[in-house]
Amino acid sequence: QVQLVESGGGLVQSGGSLRLSCAASGRFLSIYTMAWYRQAPGKQRELVASITSAGNRNYADSAKGRFTISRDNAKNTMYLQMNSLEPEDTAVYYCNANSRTVLGDTRLYWGQGTQVTVSS
């Protein structure tokens, strides 16, 4: 079982920055790909960025050039540095992690989400 806890959300003005964190804990053998998703009111959840255990990154077009995803494997923690924030970035941000459990299977876990609000 993996528990994911996001933090770092909040209210920021347009053009500002925030850094989100996602800390994984519990019993697991390893964590493979981790990712950030977001869901704005009335919209579907969408991928923001993902990162493999080897550090390979993938970004949504809306995040390219403004957001940077990273992870510290020793701390089982993932980060999302968000710069030049826009009101359109307002959403609940969720992290997920693809993990190999102690039973040997692979499961996907989600955090509870953290609210990011960007004012104009």
Image (spheres, rainbow, N blue to C red):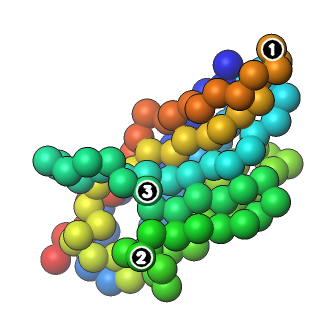
Q: Which mark is residue 75?
A: none
How many circles with numbers are drawn on the protein? 3
Q: Residue furthest front?
A: 105
- For disc 3, the neighbor class at 10 Å (few under 14, some 14 to 19, many from 20) is many
Is 79 above or below relative to 114?
Answer: below
Q: Is residue 1 positioned above or below 108 on the image?
A: above
Q: Amino acid at mark 1?
A: Leu
Q: Indicate the position of residue 90 as horizontal and vertical percent values.
A: 26, 61
Alpha carbon distance from label 1 to label 3? 28 Å
What type is the residue that disc 2 sits on? Asp
Q: Is residue 93 above or below residue 105?
A: below
On the rendered structure, is 10 left or right of 107?
A: left
Q: Position of residue 21 (x, y in %)?
A: 57, 52
Q: Residue at x 22, y 71 (%)?
A: 87
The residue closer to the viewer here, 73 or 11, is 73
Helix, strand or loop under label 3 = strand
Q: Is residue 39 left or right of residue 64?
A: left
Q: Which residue is mark 1?
A: 103
* Residue depicted at x 82% and y 36%: 30
**In contact (CB < 8 Å): disc 2 and disc 1:** no
Q: In this rendering, does residue 82 appear at all?
A: no
Say which residue label 2 marks.
61
Q: Which residue is painted at 71% across and 28% down in the image?
A: 106
Crowding near the residue tagged with mark 2, few <14, some 14–19, many ≥20 C-alpha atoms within 10 Å: few
Residue under label 3: 47
Tag 2 secondary structure: loop
First in sequence, mark 1 or 3: give its number. Answer: 3
Report whether residue 2 is seen: yes
* Sooner in the amino-acid sequence: mark 2 or mark 1: 2
> Camera-side residue: 59 or 76?
59
Q: Quadrant of the N terminus?
A: top right
Report how far apart the C-alphas of labels 2 and 1 lie in the structure. 37 Å
